[in-house]
Image (spheres, rainbow, N blue to C red):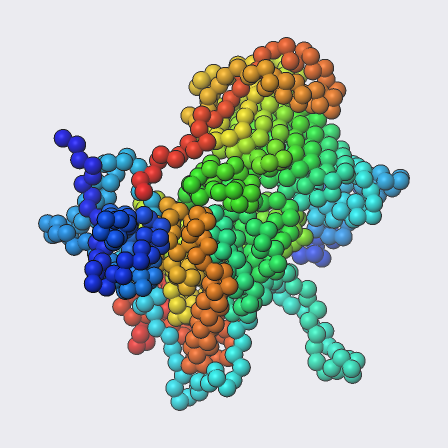
Amino acid sequence: MSGRQDMNETPNSAIVRRVPTGPARKGPTGIEPARLTAGQPGDTRGVTRRRGKKVHIDAKGVYYKTLNEQIREEIERGATEVVLDNVIGQRYIGTGLAYPGVTVTVNGVPGNDMAAFMNGPTLVVNDNAQDGVANTMNSGLVIINGDAGDVLGYGMRGGGVYVRGDVGYRVGIHMKAFGDSQPLIVIGGHARDFLGEYMAGGEIIVLGLERSDGRAEPVVGSYVGTGMHAGVMYVRGTVEDHQLGKEVRVSEPTPAEIDRIREILTHYSKVMGLDPDPIMEEPFVKIYPYTSRPYGRMYAY
Amino acid sequence: MAYTTFIPSEFRVHIDKDACIQCGRCVQQCGWNVYTWDEAEKRPIPDHNKCVACHRCVTYCPGGAITIRKNDLAFKPSDNLAPETIKAIWKQAETGGVQLTGMGNDRPYLRIFDHLLLDACQVTNPSIDPLREPMEMRTFLGRKPDSIAVAAMVAKNEGAGGYRLVTEFDRQLQLETPIMFGGMSYGSVSLNVHRALAMAAARLGTFMNTGEGGLHADLEPYQDNIIVQCASGRFGVDSSYLQAGAAVEIKIGQGAKPGIGGHLPGEKIDYEVSITRMIPQGTDALSPAPHHDIYSIEDLRQLIYALKEATGYKPISVKIACVHNVAAIASGVVRAGADIIYLDGFRGGTGASPTIIRDHVGIPLEIAIATVDQRLRDEGIRNRASIVAAGSIRGSADVAKAIALGADACAIGTAALVAMGCHVCQKCHTGCCSWGITTQRAELTRRLDPEWAASQLVNLVTAWTHEIAEVLGALGVNAIESLRGSRERLRGLGLDKTTLDILGVKPAGL
């Protein structure tokens, strides 16, 4: 076989179509092979059920590109509520979607870069989400009823992300705010290292609510707010000095800031079905940058 | 004992008293405040220390009275410790800061373009006269299919006996000349520069690149000729910005500063820039060195396809700086799904950069084009992405040689700014540009008339295009496509064997 064929990674469409798409075969572990359930490039479209302005799409075996095309088509046809069933790792759900007033519900675990560049819709995930949620998101609301992965809200410019559980590393990196666009991330559980790195605006709140497995761990990881030069973070509980980046300071929130936290948590609790009062009983610490120009003095002109 | 500074002025400003008409225009023109007006003597007094030799005052002095000279203050001669080296040590000892500079690497490294010679036809294979014969300069950038299918046409009214292309191509960028404008952000350059580049790109049928600073609302009429950039700071990136561009470029690195991020000082973030970038006025615009969502080729693929999903599958360009393993990196970038790979050589780049990075990091563009083109050919994936070469393309000869080495098109940044009046004083990062190019100060930016600047750019690129047509004619070919990757039409002069082997070029005489 020539090297050229070896290197060619584009699947031959004829071969792809021979992959059985009938009843999913289960592997030795009993788990359905993901490549079958998440689909392959091809013609397979999700089965849709429409009732009024609400549409259900069965995502099983549907390739991400087709699934996202179907979502757009349904919204263009007038759907205001799109429910995706059997989602298993399809990427880019809600990516670039710019339809305010539309709700997309994901039943299952969506793939990476969900709601990237999203502008307006509400996206509800009834499971965990993976990496890159709300990458450079502009407006809208993402609600995750589980945990989320790394780099959530990277370069986010507006709208909100509510996470019920924990989040991974580098969350809220380089979030920025301008005028009426004020991004907001609320994390019900814990956050890993590099939270709010290079942060240039917006608000992050970490609640550190008890984990279901009862394990105790710091609410946030290390290097919090490294390179941060605008915006604010509120952490419920305590943050040690060694957890902080060099460019941030901590203080007690002012009464006006406490009111702002309460306002945010009232909405978050309503969405998540929680009671905000016990959450507000524990004190918060405010993390903020000490200068808007952390590297202003580093250079010789 | 305290000295103010050891550093002598770099230049000396000489005003011919007989020629000076005492109009005070030099005082008004200088963005660096070199001149103060002496009321008593009615004449300008220069502060030599502030002069950067940008020649704004020289050009606008009605009496022609001003001369800028190098300060030839004698230092003890030393090849090793040259005056520049000594001055740099003093500057850093006095400030403790990282040295900043701009406008490309000025060190005397080997310029390979100047050691490559083009072929011409004599007797056996006649040359073509480009003044009489049509020359195809049109270039399409983007992914080409692995194979194409054609169907025979049967119906008489459709041209029976001919063939019709059946294969559907991915979206392509159509260039009427193989020269485009490289990414320079609004913020680093003034809005009038962006306007001029956009107008010129539209008139020339080519593309300008926003750089990482968003797209000002005034440029929307030109959006079909604009490539929008998405870099690590994500400045100005939203769904409408992505929709506006003809293509999206992911900037991983740039030739001016391979491996490090951008840093637009707060002084250059005025109200308009802050709106376009969506950051508060006066804060530093920091672009992190890496994209924090890209730690692997797979992650790059994820962003490429996120952008394709968000734009309805527009072409995606990936810009990388030419570094040691550029061929392997480029292979990964193409496999990640990039439609265009933009190679930025170590010599070029308009960007402000720490001097150490600008002068010592990266490899020459010529080597990068040849190795990337060869690697992609060897792997059978050259058709999947177009190569754009940039990083000190100084003239049409560089364009022709870059294309012969394997590039599909070239991009110019420095040459475009020079066409608008830049005098390469390398002080872009200070925001004091007297020519109104790399500044946001209103009294300076209004000096650049975008209409005039656009016509300068159109003239430059039109002239270069004619020159490339002359080269093609001499080579006996009638399309830029026929020169692409045709290293057989190049010979090396004064290059060592290893370099020639890497370039895939024979020495002159063979």
Q: Residue furthest left?
A: B76
Residue at image position (29%, 70%) is B493
Spot occupied by residue B312 in the image (x, y as percentages of width and height) = 67, 52
Instruction: Name above or below for residue B494 compared with residue B50.
Output: below
Residue at image position (70%, 44%) is A97
User: If the image is split into quadrants, where does the C terminus of chain B sit?
Assistant: bottom left
Depth check, front residue: B378 or B437: B437
Locate residue B79 relative to residue A1 in the image: left or right.
left
Depth check, front residue: B278 or B287: B278
Quadrant of the rendered image containing residue A253 = top right
Spot occupied by residue A255 in the image (x, y as percentages of width and height) = 59, 15
User: If the image is split into quadrants, where does the N terminus of chain B sit?
Assistant: top left
Instruction: Name above or below for residue A77 compared with residue B93.
Output: below
Depth check, front residue: B451 or B461: B451
Residue at image position (63%, 35%) is A180
Spot occupied by residue B322 in the image (x, y as percentages of width and height) = 41, 53
Depth check, front residue: B384 or B280: B280
Residue B195 visible in the shown view = yes
Spot occupied by residue A205 in the image (x, y as percentages of width and height) = 60, 23
Residue at image position (72%, 46%) is A68
Total label count?
0
Locate residue A99 relative to residue B237 in the image: left or right.
right
Locate residue A203 relative to residue B99 in the image: left or right.
right
Quadrant of the rendered image containing residue B222 = bottom right
